[in-house]
């Protein structure tokens, strides 16, 4: 059984702890600064993860796909060449699917640029055949099909879909890396804010710290008080910023889906990305606790 003196010391230490770091309120501007940083961090992380998922989906969707163009001014000859090439492609073992594009559908797609003349038949619109190749060695297969189709007619061309959208994929990848860089910078800024807040709290409670030292408290015990309070403040700010960012992400996601664009709708987050976003506030709290502990222990060590 503890002696009355020891129990009194523990009560005094507990009272000093509550006077030093109040439990019932959030002190100072640090939680609100962290909330703003968390808001920007989650948005940047969501953008990076969404762009990464879009690039991955685009690569999987375009891999092994190509379009055959028959550039022939004579409509009858163009139709004959299109049918012959479609038949030859269906016999090829490396071609998994052959889908000729109807001329009416092609005219409808170019109508916004050419007007009613697109469907008049006076314009020599090339015939298109979309093909899907078997997995693996797409470039070699496309080159072999190019020679095969050129033997049928020198007016036939074949282009892989990835060749057209490669610059766009590179742009999306660059934007994703930029978002990752912003997340790293915001993480460093959050750690710097915590360090400044911990130093300010230490300096403002220097007298109370001396009393705790006289009562037998160690530097680790004192640092634990700071890291616990600062960790709770960081968790409050992180949760607030995360909630605001989540609302913005959901609103923007609805707008992207409303556009009806296949490219924009590909910028979406799988469940693993949502889990990663949800872990950011907890990571912020752990970062704040570690930074606060390191800062306070270093400041206390300088007093010796």
Image (cartoon, rainbow, N blue to C red):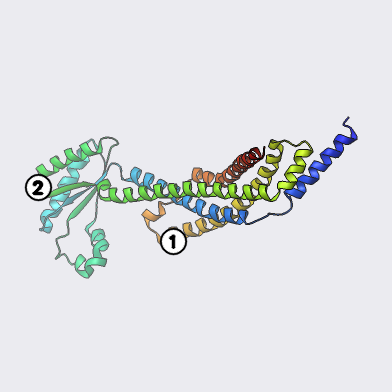
108 shown above or below 134: below
268 and 303: which is toward the camera? 303
In this view, which residue lies farthest toward the right?
Answer: 4
74 and 192: which is toward the camera? 192
x and y, in percent, of residue 97 in the image: 27, 43
- The image quarter containing residue 92 is top left
x and y, in percent, of residue 50 in the image: 44, 49
User: Is 254 left or right of 157, judged from the image as shown?
Assistant: right
Helix, strand or loop at label 1? It is: helix
Q: Which residue is pictured at 52% across the width and 49% down the height?
A: 189
User: Is 183 left or right of 76, judged from the image as shown?
Assistant: right
Q: Quadrant of the N terminus?
A: top right
Residue indicated by mark 2: 154
81 shown above or below 115: above
Helix, strand or loop at label 2? It is: loop
User: Is 166 left or right of 46, judged from the image as shown?
Assistant: left
- First along the sequence among labels 2 and 1: 2
Count neighbours of disc 2 (C-alpha within 10 A) and say few if under 14, some if 14 to 19, many if 20 or more: few
Alpha carbon of mark 2 to alpha carbon of mark 1: how far?
43 Å
38 and 121: which is toward the camera? 38
- Label number found at residue 258: 1
In this view, which residue lies farthest toward the bottom?
Answer: 116
Q: Which residue is pictured at 78% across the width and 45% down the height?
A: 16
Q: Which residue is pictured at 22% across the width and 41% down the height?
A: 90
- Label number found at residue 131: none
x and y, in percent, of residue 294 in the image: 61, 39
- Residue 269 seen from this side: no
Q: Quadrant of the C terminus?
A: top right
């Amino acid at each position: 059984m503890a002696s009355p003196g020891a129990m009194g010391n523990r009560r005094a230490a507990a009272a000093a702890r509550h006077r030093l770091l109040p439990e019932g309120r959030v002190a100072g501007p640090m939680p609100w600064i962290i909330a703003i940083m968390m808001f920007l961090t989650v948005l940047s992380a969501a953008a990076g993860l969404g762009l990464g998922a879009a690039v991955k989906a685009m690569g999987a969707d375009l891999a092994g796909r190509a379009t055959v163009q028959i550039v022939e001014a004579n409509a009858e000859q163009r139709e004959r060449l299109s049918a012959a090439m479609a038949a030859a492609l269906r016999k090829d073992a490396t071609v998994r699917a052959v889908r000729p594009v109807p001329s009416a559908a092609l005219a409808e797609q170019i109508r916004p640029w050419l007007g009613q003349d697109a469907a008049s038949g006076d314009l020599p619109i090339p015939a298109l055949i979309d093909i899907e190749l078997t997995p693996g060695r797409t470039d070699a297969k496309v080159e072999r099909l190019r020679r095969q189709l050129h033997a049928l007619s020198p007016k036939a061309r074949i282009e892989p879909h990835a060749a057209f959208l490669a610059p766009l994929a590179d742009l999306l990848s660059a934007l994703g890396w930029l978002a990752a860089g912003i997340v790293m910078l915001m993480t460093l800024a959050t750690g710097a804010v915590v360090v400044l807040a911990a130093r300010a709290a230490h300096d403002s409670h220097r007298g109370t710290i001396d009393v705790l030292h006289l009562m037998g408290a160690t530097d680790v015990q004192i640092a634990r008080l700071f890291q616990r309070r600062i960790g709770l403040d960081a968790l409050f700010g992180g949760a607030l910023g995360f909630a605001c960012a989540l609302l913005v992400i959901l609103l923007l996601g609805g707008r992207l889906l409303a556009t009806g664009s296949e490219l924009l709708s590909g910028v979406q987050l799988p469940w693993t990305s949502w889990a990663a976003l949800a872990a950011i506030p907890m990571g912020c709290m752990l970062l704040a606790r570690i930074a606060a502990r390191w800062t306070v222990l270093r400041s206390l060590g300088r007093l010796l």
